[in-house]
Image (cartoon, coloured by chain):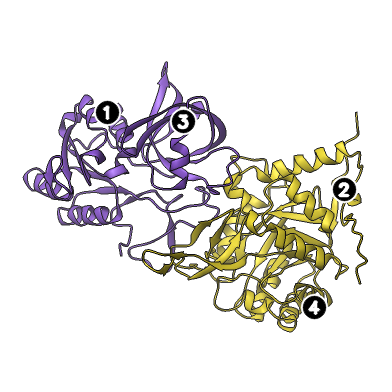
Chain colours: A yellow, B purple
Amino acid sequence: MTAKPNTRIDIGGLELKNPVMTASGTFGYGREFADLIDLNRLGAIIVKGLSLEPSKGNPPLRIVETRCGMLNAIGLENVGLEAFVKGKIPFLQKLTTPILVNIYGKTKEEYAELAARLDDIEAISGIEVNISCPNVKAGGAAFGAYPQTAAEVVRAVRSKTTKPLVVKLSPNVTDIAEIARSVEAAGADSVSLINTITGMAIDIESRRPKLANITGGLSGPAIKPIALRMVWQVAQSVKIPVIGVGGIMNAKDALEFLIAGAAAVQIGTANFINPRATLDVIEGIESYLIEKEISDISEIIGSLETNQIIS
Amino acid sequence: MFQENVQILWNKKIGPSYYCIGLTCHEGYGMAKPGQFIMLRLPAKTAPFLRRPFSIHRIITTDDRATGIELLYKVVGDGTDKLSRCRQGDSADILGPLGNGFSVFDNYQRIAIVAGGIGVAPMLFLAIALQTKGVDLSKCTVFLGGNSTDDLLCRDDFNRLGIRTHVTTDDGSAGDQCFVTHPLEMALEKNRADIIYACGPMEMLKCVVGIAAKHKIPCQISIETIMACGMGACLGCAVEKKDDASIYMHACMDGPVFEADALKFN
């Protein structure tokens, strides 16, 4: 019998037992899934995007099913920092799985304050800086759209915390690799990509947008090829680890991202359809490694072979 | 809450575009409350992409143990169309029971149940739960409304339980030609109810809530919204709160059953 392959991986100072994380906004605060899966088997849990103050989010209708995907315009509804610390941390700190908090601010000062206040909390293993939410008016993707503003937010956060920093990038930009290099220079320990792709849907009877927010973020298998291409590009452009996100529904999808150069993956929309999607991916990756007699997951990361010489 | 792959026991057409499907389920569904729902997905289908919510119509029991659930559904789109083509022995993935459900009290005897169209789906389960609680069903009335006679479901089921039914249709093909809320209000004026339970289109619910408020009668309504996960993760099923604009509620966790005065109607 083949020995169990090593799936442990270091993502910019984050020690994960396997490379499978939950994408922010698709897994609540973890507890929602506790009846259905063993949360301690996950590589990491990234909780719902957090702001300093509670945030109501966007009016309904907030989600629309599309072909092979869905649009959402939740608008970062969340309980706010205080309620998160009091109400959610006590459960999360009992888990052995590393917890990352996705943070969002309207100004770079708000990002910095969130980072400073989360820095003291031992139960939090890392921070994911959300500069890519397409569904809020101020902040979010507005910062992530330009290399300079993205870097400013990351520098502000970096100055307030020593915890590992993941920066979540938007695909709604001209050159995602440039943004990635910029946040790397500003002190990011890793980058995660992609956030959702801006899209819309129209009701032809009423001739009105289906989403109250008019536009929303497209996720699901429809965006996987785009995410994969961007991960591949970014992985060649930065030295820090890249976390692949976008339409991963199963282990095969996740393996594509790892081969393209992602050191870890996040499972998002798949959690809605199959609450145990993360575990299926973990098990599927292990089976693949065993079948291919690969003893360490690092052997497949960025192992893509092309005949092209990348300049 | 259970996620499981289950067998389809039957999938019967009970009217034009209406079906009744039986599914095997975990024994834990014996604890399910009327008004709770499940999220269903057919295997290996890329469309529809998301699960679909269905309220539990009835719990199937064998020797007092829950062995299955029955759902009542109307074919309205791609998801329900595909479901209607499933046959006995096919499999489905279900997640449930989800949501809060109706509160059933043993001290309320005169009960009005109002159902519009497919909104009747959770109401048979409710009637059975009331009976189990010891409520005298002869003092209950079900007000059933639909577009036409084809949309009036479960009349026989309610009658078998000893519940009176009062039917209305929009086209006059059965019962009175009016909205279902009309006979409800007439009945309440003659004889006050202890509680009203309602499920149906939003316009109907808005009207029922108005009637309940006018007569100061406790009222619980079950609403239908679009949702992706059904378990509080996606936050897609936001609904407006009546007296508090600072926060949304979510149909999957705070509902789908709400006290009549909790929701803001547009």
Q: Amino acid at mark 2?
A: Ile
Q: Secondary structure at mark 2?
A: helix
Q: Amino acid at mark 3?
A: Tyr
In the picture of the structure, the residue carrying the numbered disc 4 is: A182
Q: Which is closer to the viewer, label 2 or label 1?
A: 2
**Label 3 packing within 10 angstroms: few (<14), some (14-19), many (20+):** many
Chain to which mark 2 belongs: A
Identify the residue at the far top of this view: B63
Q: Nearer the viewer, residue B32 or A176?
A: A176
Q: Are marks 1 and 3 in contact (CB under 8 Å)?
A: no
Chain to which mark 1 belongs: B
Q: Amino acid at mark 1?
A: Gln
The correct choice, above or below, for B210 with respect to A140 in the image is above
In the picture of the structure, the residue carrying the numbered disc 3 is: B29
Task: Find residue B98 and report its horizontal and vertical position in percent.
Answer: 47, 42
In the picture of the structure, the residue carrying the numbered disc 1 is: B131
State whether discs 4 and 3 lie on one chain.
no
In the picture of the structure, the residue carrying the numbered disc 2 is: A297
Q: CA distance from mark 1 to mark 3?
A: 18 Å
Q: Amino acid at mark 4?
A: Ser
